[in-house]
């Protein structure tokens, strides 16, 4: 959504470019517009024309625009604006889910690879695969894909649990599933009570989640995400000391 807003703003900024202004001001405007349009992969025919114009103006940066340049710029600005607006109309936009327990802003940050408050310092210790699972889970929560969000969250936790199992037992996990891993971990002394609380809750859900008729509600999916995030923080805190 932010990228589309930037594209819209770039299109509107084209209308505010004044050919009577100093060349440096026009160059700055064109450069800003170019960078915003690149963020959402707008047709290269548009972005390259804008970039080419900006480069040409930069060659005579200290000079004022002559009459021919001004007229050519006016035509180009009108054409580019129409092309961008046409591009935006063709873009499909998905509305985020209705507000639940979780902040859309914070979920959006996770979806972009920023941990926000959900994973804290644990995020930077995760593997790329683990981070990707939670980024996708956050996207699913934003787009009302509750069952997918829960399943991906649980998958992300299972990968972390296998690491934790090897850390606590000094044995290979042998591709054990979440239920077995948690069963064995609960026999080990010294594991935080809050962590075992998260894991007991999630262990029951993991079995039902695999049933083909199981569908998660928004509240359930968000709760799974919160519990998984809490478990991940506790696990990495224990492993890192």
Image (cartoon, grey):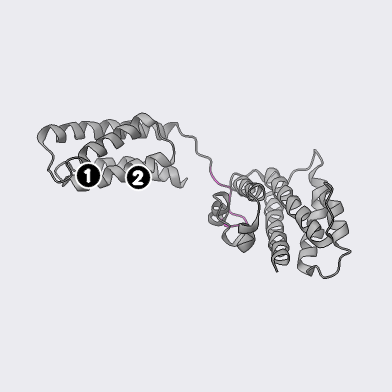
Residue 35 sits in quarter: top left
Q: Which residue is label 1 attached to?
A: 26
Examine the residues drawn in magenta and state their main secondary structure.
loop
Q: Which residue is label 2 attached to?
A: 9
Q: Is residue 73 above or below residue 6?
A: above
Identify the residue shown where x is 54% and y is 49%: 112
Identify the residue shown where x is 18% and y is 43%: 18
Q: Is residue 45 above or below residue 120?
A: above
Q: Is residue 208 magenta?
A: no
Toward the viewer: 85 or 170?
A: 170
Identify the residue shown where x is 40% and y is 31%: 43
Counting residues from the start of the chain, the first of labels 1 and 2 encountered is: 2
Q: Is residue 101 magenta?
A: yes
Residue 128: x %, y % from top left: 63, 48
Identify the residue shown where x is 80% and y is 57%: 166
Q: Where's the C terminus, which quadrant?
A: bottom right
Toward the viewer: 9 or 125?
A: 125
Residue 72: x %, y % from top left: 18, 31
Residue 135: x %, y % from top left: 61, 48
Crowd around label 1: few <14 · some 14–19 · many ≥20 (10 Å):
many
Crowd around label 2: few <14 · some 14–19 · many ≥20 (10 Å):
some
């Amino acid at each position: 959504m932010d990228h589309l807003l930037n594209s819209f703003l770039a299109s509107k900024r084209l209308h505010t470019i004044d050919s009577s202004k100093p060349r440096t001001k026009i160059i700055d405007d064109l450069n800003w517009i170019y960078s915003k349009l690149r963020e959402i992969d707008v047709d290269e025919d548009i972005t390259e024309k804008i970039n080419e114009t900006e480069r040409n103006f930069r060659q005579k940066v200290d000079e004022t625009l002559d009459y021919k340049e001004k007229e050519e710029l006016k035509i180009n600005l009108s054409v580019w604006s129409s092309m961008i607006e046409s591009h935006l109309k063709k873009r499909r936009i998905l509305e985020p889910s209705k507000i639940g327990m979780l902040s859309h802003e914070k979920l959006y940050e996770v979806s972009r690879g920023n941990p926000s408050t959900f994973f804290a310092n644990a995020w930077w210790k995760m593997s790329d695969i683990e981070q990707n699972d939670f980024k996708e889970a956050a996207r699913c929560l934003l787009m009302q894909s509750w069952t997918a969000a829960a399943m991906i969250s649980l998958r992300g936790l299972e990968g972390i649990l296998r690491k934790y199992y090897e850390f606590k037992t000094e044995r290979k996990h042998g591709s054990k599933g979440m239920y077995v891993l948690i069963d064995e971990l609960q026999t080990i002394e010294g594991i935080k009570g809050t962590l075992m609380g998260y894991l007991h809750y999630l262990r029951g859900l993991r079995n039902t989640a695999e049933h083909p008729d199981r569908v998660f509600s928004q509240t359930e999916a968000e709760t799974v995400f919160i519990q998984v995030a809490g478990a991940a923080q506790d696990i990495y805190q224990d492993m890192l000391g």
